[in-house]
Image (cartoon, grey):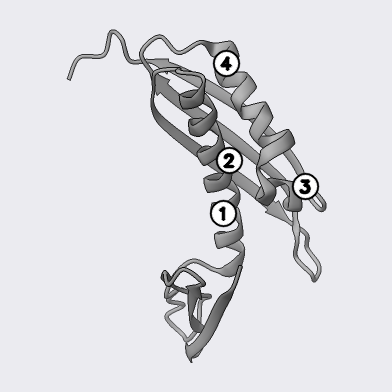
């Protein structure tokens, strides 16, 4: 896997993945405190959520569960001193579908966090990662 980061100006950078996707990233700079994009640490948190959401959907689809939507809300704390690594991450999953089996959703999340999600596995070296989840049955939802 490869990536390239190019400094643009002030605290603004453009990251390019080996597959050619680009993203602007940076931190607040100047008197107005503008942020040109997510910070590198925000991208790490987003990456962990994306990695795990991908796993959960894949596992449920493979098990023929009628998954329609999956959202992961993450809340994290960082160390006060440099390097300001994540020390705590909580992941709240909301999985929607028609008649989803709660036990299968719980198992899919556990498999992701304990076995498959490499981003979470790396972050778990410095952070305590906790999670909870909600299953929303869309059978009765109209419109």
Residue 52: mark: 2
Asked if marks 4 and 3 touch (Cβ < 8 Å), the reply is no
Q: Distance between the Cα atoms at labels 2 and 4?
A: 15 Å
Which residue is rendered at x = 56% and y = 33% of the image?
Answer: 92
Label 2 or label 1, whichever comes before in sequence order: 1
Q: Distance between the Cα atoms at labels 3 and 2?
A: 13 Å
Q: In this view, does 45 lie above or below 130?
A: below
Look at mark 4 in the image and give the residue it sits on.
104
Residue 47: mark: 1
Look at mark 3 in the image and give the residue it sits on.
124
Q: What element carries label 4?
A: helix
Estimate how packed mark 3 is, as few (under 14), some (14 to 19) or many (20 or more) residues with alpha carbons within 10 Å: some
Label 3 or label 1, whichever comes before in sequence order: 1
Residue 133 rendering spot, x and y as whole percentages: 56, 24
Mark 3 or 2, which is nearer the eye? 2
Which residue is rendered at x = 61% and y = 37% of the image?
Answer: 91
- To which quarter of the image does residue 35 belong? bottom left
Q: Distance between the Cα atoms at labels 1 and 4?
A: 23 Å
Name the residue nearer the viewer: 69 or 128: 69
């Amino acid at each position: 896997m490869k990536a390239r980061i190019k400094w643009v100006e002030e605290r603004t950078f453009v990251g390019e993945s080996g597959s050619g996707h680009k993203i602007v990233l940076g931190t607040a700079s100047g008197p107005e405190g503008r942020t040109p994009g997510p910070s590198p640490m925000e991208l790490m948190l987003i990456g962990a959520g994306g990695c795990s959401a991908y796993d959960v959907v894949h596992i449920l689809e493979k098990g023929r569960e009628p998954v329609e939507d999956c959202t992961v809300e993450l809340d994290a704390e960082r160390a006060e001193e440099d390097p300001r690594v994540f020390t705590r991450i909580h992941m709240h999953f909301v999985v929607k579908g028609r008649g989803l089996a709660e036990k299968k959703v719980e198992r899919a999340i556990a498999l992701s966090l304990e076995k498959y999600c490499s981003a979470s596995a790396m972050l778990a070296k410095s952070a305590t990662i906790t999670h909870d989840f909600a299953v929303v049955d869309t059978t009765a939802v109209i419109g």
